[in-house]
Image (tube, rainbow, N blue to C red):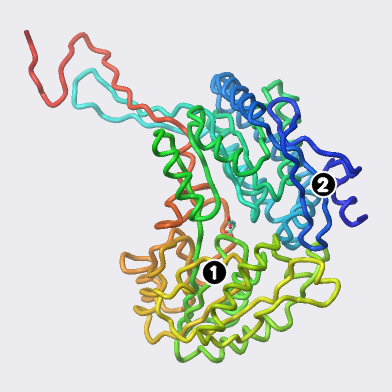
C-alpha cells in the first residue's frame, strides 16, 4: 500500500517486492528461511526478510569477536564520540523511524517516536558515561600497596529483544555496551525485522564512516533456532534478554550453565493502588494510559487496579468513560490513541483471558471483544477491557498471569496494608504505583514494608520510565537492570588489582610464611 511504502522508503527500506538481507556483520547477507513482516493494522505483508543460516550466524559471531578485540583498544571517550554521531544520525531520522515502529509494531505515532527518542536519550547518556566509567582506589592494609578496581571491556554482548519495543531496548543495550568497549550482536524479534534493519543501517553507516568494523554492532535476524544458538554460544559473554518468563527461564539456565552473564527483563504484572485522598485528575489518566497505551503491550502496562473502597465506584465511572470514547484506528493517524495488537496470536491471548474472566463470573465493565467492523476487522484490534473479578485472591490465575493485551482487572481494598499485600503477592515484580497525597503512605510504599517491584512510583503511572534510572524488575521479572543508574557496571569485567610498589612483600591479614 502507499501508506506502507512512504514509511518504508523514508527509512531506506526497499519497497519493491524483493527479499531483504537480515544479517549484518560488516556486510549485509542472509540466505536462510524467509520471515514475513506483517502489518498489524492492515494484515498486509510489508516485506520478506532472509534470516541467518547456521553458517552465517557462526560467521557473525566470529566477526563480532574480532570486532571486540579491536574495539576494546579504542579509548572510551573516542567510543563516546562514535556514539554521539549515532545519536545525531538517529535523531535526524527520529520521526521516520518512529513511523516505522507504528507501521510494523502497531503502537501509535507519538509512542513510536517516543521510543526512538529513548534511544537518542540513552546515546546522550552513553556519551557522558564514556568519560565516567570509573573504577576506584581502595586503601590497602599493607604499607606500600594500593588496590584499584578496574573496569575493562567485557566481550560480545548478545541482545535478544522483544516485539513491543523493537528499537528502544536495543538502544539501551547498544549505548552502554558500546561505551564500555564491547561488540554487540542483536537478535531482534522475528516479527519486527524492518525496525532492526533500519536501525542497523543507520548505526553501521556511522561505524563504517569512522573506520570501525561494522561487526561492533552485528544483526542476526532469525527464529527460535537462531536465538538458541546465540544463547548457547560460549563466545557470547553476556546475554541480555527481554521477553516472556517461560523463555527467560530457559535462557537463564542455558547461560548460567556455561557460566556466562545474563541480564533478564521478563514479564510484568503491574499494579496501581489508588488511595481515598488521591488526586483523581492525576490518577484516572495515568491508569488509562498505563492500561490502554501501547494496547497493553508494555512490560510496564498497568494490569491490576486496586481501589480504596471510598473512591472505587467514582474512579471506575471516570475510567469507563475514557475507555468508551478511546480513539481507535490506524496508529499512523495523528489522533489515534489505540492501535492494534501486534499479532493475531495476541488476540487469542486476549480472548482466553476475557473468557476465563467471564467463566469465573467477573463483571466486564468495558470491552471484552474485538472490533469487528471494517476497516478495523482487517487488523488485530480489540476493545480495551476493564474487569471486576469476583475474587481478589492473588492466588487466582487471572491475578498471577501477565496477559499481554489491554485487560485491566480491578479490586477494592480496605486499607493500604491490604493493597500492598496484593501488590506483592504475584510472582512478577516489575512496576507499581501508588496515588496519594499522604506522605506517611508514600513512606510506607517505598520502604521495607512497601512495594517489592523494581519500579515503585508515586502519583505517576506504571509505564513510561525515563532512561536515567536503572530499569528492570525483581522476582520472576528476572532481577535485570538496564538503561541508567548502575546498569553499565554489568557491561564490563571488573578486576581488583593489588599493586605492591614497595621493596617488601607482606602478606594480607598479617600471615607469616617466612621460610
Ligand atoms: C518494555 O515494556 O519492555 O517504562 C520496556 C516504559 C518504557 C520501557 C518499557 N520506557 O514503559
Say above or below: 316 vs 163: below
Nearest the eye: 56 or 504 = 56
Left/right placement of residue 72 relative to residue 138 reads right
- Give the residue number, with chain letter if any, for mark 1: 460
Q: Residue at x 74, y 82 (%)?
A: 325
Question: Looking at this view, is 181 or 192 the one in front?
Answer: 192
User: In front here: 439 or 491?
Assistant: 491
Residue 61 picture location, percent across and down: 59, 27
Instruction: Look at the numbered disc 1 and give the secondary structure of its residue.
Output: loop
Ligand 1 image position (quadrant): bottom right
Locate residue 431 relative to residue 338 in the image: left or right.
left
Q: Which residue lies under the disc numbered 2?
A: 47
- Compared with 348, 48 (above or below) is above
Determine the image quadrant of residue 366: bottom right
**Structural distance between the alpha carbons of marks 1 and 2:** 39 Å
Q: Classify the position of the N terminus by image quarter.
A: bottom right
Characterize the local packing of mark 2: few (<14), some (14-19) or many (20 or more) Cα atoms within 10 angstroms: many
Which residue lies at the image location 70% right of the left edge and 63% below the top edge? 344
Amino acid at each position: 500500500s502507499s501508506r506502507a511504502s512512504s514509511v518504508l522508503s523514508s527509512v531506506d527500506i526497499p519497497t519493491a517486492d524483493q527479499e531483504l538481507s537480515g544479517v549484518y556483520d560488516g556486510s549485509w547477507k542472509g540466505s536462510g528461511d524467509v520471515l514475513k513482516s506483517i502489518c498489524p493494522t492492515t494484515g498486509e505483508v510489508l516485506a520478506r526478510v532472509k534470516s541467518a543460516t547456521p553458517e552465517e550466524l557462526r560467521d557473525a559471531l566470529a566477526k563480532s569477536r574480532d570486532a571486540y578485540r579491536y574495539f576494546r583498544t579504542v579509548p572510551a571517550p573516542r567510543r563516546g564520540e562514535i556514539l554521539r554521531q549515532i545519536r545525531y544520525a538517529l535523531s535526524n531520522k527520529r520521526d521516520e523511524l518512529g513511523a516505522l515502529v507504528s507501521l510494523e509494531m502497531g503502537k501509535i505515532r507519538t509512542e513510536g517516536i517516543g521510543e526512538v527518542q529513548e534511544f537518542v536519550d540513552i546515546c546522550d547518556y552513553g556519551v557522558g558515561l564514556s568519560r565516567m566509567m570509573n573504577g576506584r582506589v581502595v586503601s590497602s592494609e599493607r604499607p606500600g600497596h594500593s588496590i584499584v578496581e578496574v573496569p575493562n571491556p567485557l566481550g560480545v554482548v548478545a541482545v535478544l529483544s522483544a516485539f513491543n519495543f523493537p528499537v528502544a531496548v536495543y538502544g539501551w543495550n547498544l549505548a552502554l555496551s558500546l561505551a564500555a568497549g564491547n561488540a554487540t550482536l542483536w537478535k531482534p524479534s522475528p516479527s519486527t525485522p524492518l525496525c532492526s534493519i533500519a536501525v542497523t543501517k543507520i548505526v553501521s553507516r556511522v561505524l563504517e564512516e569512522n573506520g570501525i568494523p561494522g561487526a561492533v554492532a552485528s544483526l542476526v535476524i532469525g527464529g527460535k533456532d537462531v536465538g538458541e544458538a546465540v544463547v548457547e554460544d560460549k563466545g557470547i559473554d553476556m546475554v541480555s534478554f527481554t521477553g516472556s518468563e517461560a523463555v527467560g527461564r530457559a535462557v537463564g539456565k542455558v547461560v548460567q550453565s556455561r557460566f556466562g552473564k545474563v541480564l533478564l527483563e521478563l514479564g510484568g504484572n503491574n499494579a496501581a493502588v489508588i488511595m481515598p485522598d488521591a488526586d483523581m485528575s492525576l490518577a484516572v489518566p495515568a491508569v488509562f494510559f498505563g492500561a490502554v497505551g501501547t494496547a497493553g503491550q508494555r512490560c510496564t502496562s498497568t494490569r491490576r487496579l486496586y481501589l480504596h473502597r471510598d473512591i472505587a465506584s467514582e474512579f471506575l465511572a471516570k475510567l469507563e468513560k475514557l475507555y468508551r470514547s478511546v480513539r481507535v484506528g490506524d496508529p499512523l493517524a495523528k489522533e489515534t490513541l489505540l492501535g492494534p495488537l501486534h499479532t493475531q496470536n495476541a488476540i487469542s491471548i486476549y480472548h482466553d483471558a476475557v473468557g476465563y474472566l467471564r467463566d469465573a463470573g467477573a463483571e466486564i465493565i468495558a470491552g471484552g471483544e474485538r472490533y469487528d467492523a471494517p476497516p478495523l476487522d482487517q487488523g488485530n484490534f480489540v476493545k480495551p477491557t476493564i474487569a471486576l473479578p469476583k475474587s481478589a485472591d492473588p492466588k487466582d490465575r487471572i491475578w498471577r498471569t501477565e496477559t499481554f493485551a489491554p485487560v485491566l482487572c480491578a479490586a477494592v481494598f480496605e486499607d493500604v496494608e491490604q493493597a500492598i499485600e496484593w501488590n506483592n503477592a504475584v510472582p512478577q515484580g516489575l512496576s507499581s504505583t501508588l496515588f496519594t497525597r499522604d506522605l506517611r503512605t508514600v513512606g510506607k510504599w517505598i520502604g521495607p514494608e512497601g512495594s517489592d517491584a523494581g519500579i515503585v512510583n508515586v502519583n505517576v503511572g506504571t509505564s513510561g520510565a525515563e532512561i536515567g534510572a536503572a530499569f528492570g524488575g525483581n522476582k520472576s521479572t528476572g532481577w535485570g537492570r538496564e538503561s541508567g543508574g548502575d546498569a553499565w557496571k554489568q557491561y564490563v569485567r571488573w578486576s581488583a588489582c593489588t599493586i605492591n610498589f614497595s621493596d617488601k612483600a607482606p602478606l594480607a591479614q598479617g600471615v607469616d610464611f617466612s621460610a
